Amino acid sequence: DAGVIQSPRHEVTEMGQEVTLRCKPISGHDYLFWYRQTMMRGLELLIYFNNNVPIDDSGMPEDRFSAKMPNASFSTLKIQPSEPRDSAVYFCASRPQGHEQYFGPGTRLTVT
Amino acid sequence: DAKTTQPTSMDCAEGRAANLPCNHSTISGNEYVYWYRQIHSQGPQYIIHGLKNNETNEMASLIITEDRKSSTLILPHATLRDTAVYYCIAEYNNNDMRFGAGTRLTVKP
């Protein structure tokens, strides 16, 4: 298995633009997670899905952020409009029933 | 979720055992202790987890005290590739994982 796949790996955009981050979880995994990592706040859970249904989105910073999982093999995290403070590394992770989360390589987002 | 406390940084000589401590004095009975690590610029990697008993896998050993208020992750023969930030997390269902600052382990030749 190729592991969790994220795209793009790097994104540079201007303030006010819409940004869409993509994630393909490991096949057969029931749970999908989106995290954000910054130097100031560390690694934070934004939202997670179980069987394509959002379970907990309490970590989503504000209405500018939205996440969807239209099917078991694809999820998006959208920021609209983007702001410089959204600059961070965004990780997607998935896991089966059980204990291990498998993280993707991350998307480094820079908003200028 | 129980709060965990870890040293900010540690050094270890290559080939020696690395012992990383974690305090979780408020852990509840149904919370597991998880360990992940993050090598620079990569996504975190699962290492091991345990509830009450000591655990061992191909990567590491986890020693949990009888009162469950603390634990130690042991890398038996540290290599340079083990240099990373190690996170100790107390969580009951592996969904709402709260990664703290972790311990920055530096393995030196």
Image (cartoon, rainbow, N blue to C red):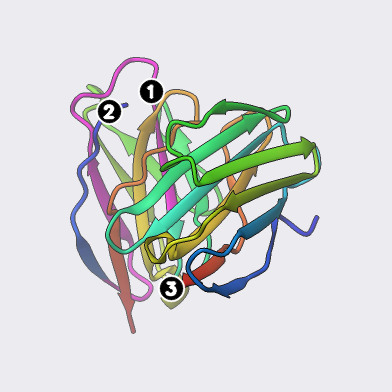
The answer to if A81 sits in the magenta stretch is: no
Instruction: Tell me the subunit letter for badge 3.
Output: B
Question: How many numbered marks, from 0 up?
Answer: 3
Secondary structure found at label 1: loop
Q: Tags 3 and 2 in contact by the CB under 8 Å rule?
A: no
The answer to if B20 sits in the magenta stretch is: yes
Instruction: Tell me the subunit letter for badge 2.
Output: B
Q: Which disc number belongs to residue B31?
A: 1
Quadrant in which the N terminus of chain B appears: top left
* Amino acid type, callout 1: Glu
Q: Position of residue B15 (x, y in %)?
A: 38, 73
Q: Which disc number belongs to residue B2?
A: 2
Q: Nearer the viewer, residue B58 or A8?
A: A8
Q: Are marks 3 and 2 on the same chain?
A: yes
> Image height check: is A64 above or below A85?
above
Measure the alpha-carbon separation of dots 3 and 2. 31 Å
Measure the alpha-carbon separation of dots 3 and 1. 30 Å
